[in-house]
Amino acid sequence: MKRWRSAVRALALSLWAAGAACAEPVSIVFAGDIMLDEGPGRVIASGRDPLRHFAAYLIDADFTVGNLECPIATIGLPLDSKIYLFRAHPRVLSVLRERFDAVSVANNHSGDYGKQAFLQTLGLLDEAGIRHFGGGRDLAAAHAPLWVEKKGLRIALLGYNEFKPRAFEAGPDWPGIAWSEDSQVVADIRAARAAGADLVIPFMHWGWEREPRPSERQRQLARVLIDAGADAVVGAHPHITQGAEIYKGRPIIYSLGNFVFDGFKKEALRTGWLLRLTMDRGGVLAWETRAARADAEGTPHPVPGALTPCWRAGEAAARECRNP
């Protein structure tokens, strides 16, 4: 009887393993900076959707993620120490939740109106059913991964900021964002692996603004993260795209630039990328980027014919693909 049970158990495990190995690929679309105050906020207040031109592309993905570059709140006081401060009205949530499953709050604007506005943002996102990561009610919550479970895959998303002010950082018993401390990020990646992640993807808020190439710091840290077990590294913050490369067969997309943002005049600062990663249990199978150029109100539009980075497994380096 014991031998029969062992045989049945072995067969069940082999069938499960075969099914897992043949799991259907999962696609996640990442967007860069999404700022829903000022111009984009006025667009939404007028009854229009600034994300409408990419609705089909976003809906086609299994999961969608963006960097929320502003608190969404009705309370709080603006910080005296900052030149640019943003705070979106809660009315923007109805538009955001139609297009995005989750947002990273690990950036240098989440704390623009203080801790109470940040906490209200988290609460409003929860009420709207928009998941969030890279920040929380304390340090542990800020560093906790967002678990994405799709088609048999378990994916851990982690969010970090390393652009001042560091005063927004979460503490043992106070709210804030996850700060990009190398040893802590490496520990978080390894902890996610130990907790059963099939893939781990850090979403970084890093780099110098308006610089079209990544800094040596970004290049060094990206490699550290992949060496620690990250399957891809995705970045934002510089308000401009910064290219992409392959390291040990894994993609690094240094900056997606702006997605929804107004106030920029130069075309390079108004043009960001949407990134689609296609993955299975073995890692990233392919990825592509789509150009998104914002108009004067901050609404992004497709750029047919644009050449943007792409890659498929087995290729030694990223190449350029023409946008439809």
Image (tube, rainbow, N blue to C red):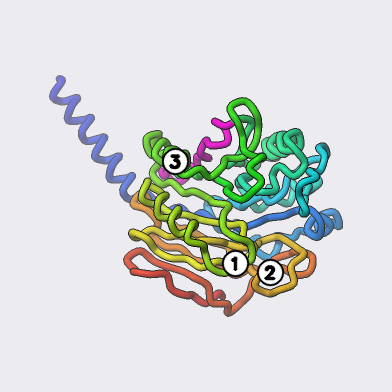
Q: Which corner quadrant of the image does residue 76 belong to?
A: top right
Marks 3 and 1 close (CB-CB < 8 Å): no
Q: Amino acid at mark 2?
A: Arg
Amino acid at pointer 3: Ser
- The image quadrant of residue 112 is top right
Within 10 Å of disc 3 (Cα), the crowding (few <14, some 14-19, many 20+) is few
Name of the residue lying farthest toward the front? 81
Quarter of the figure with the C terminus: bottom right
Magenta residue span: 139-154
Magenta stretch: residue 140 in it? yes
At label 1, the amino acid type is Glu
Mark sitting earlier along the chain (2/1): 1
- Residue under numbered circle 3: 183
Residue at left offset 53%, top offset 72%: 308
Q: Secondary structure at mark 1?
A: loop
Residue drawn at (68%, 55%), measured in percent from left and top?
A: 34
Report, in whole angstroms, how far the alpha carbon at label 3 lies from the one at label 2: 34 Å
Q: Which residue is mark 1?
A: 211
Residue bearing the label numbered 2: 270
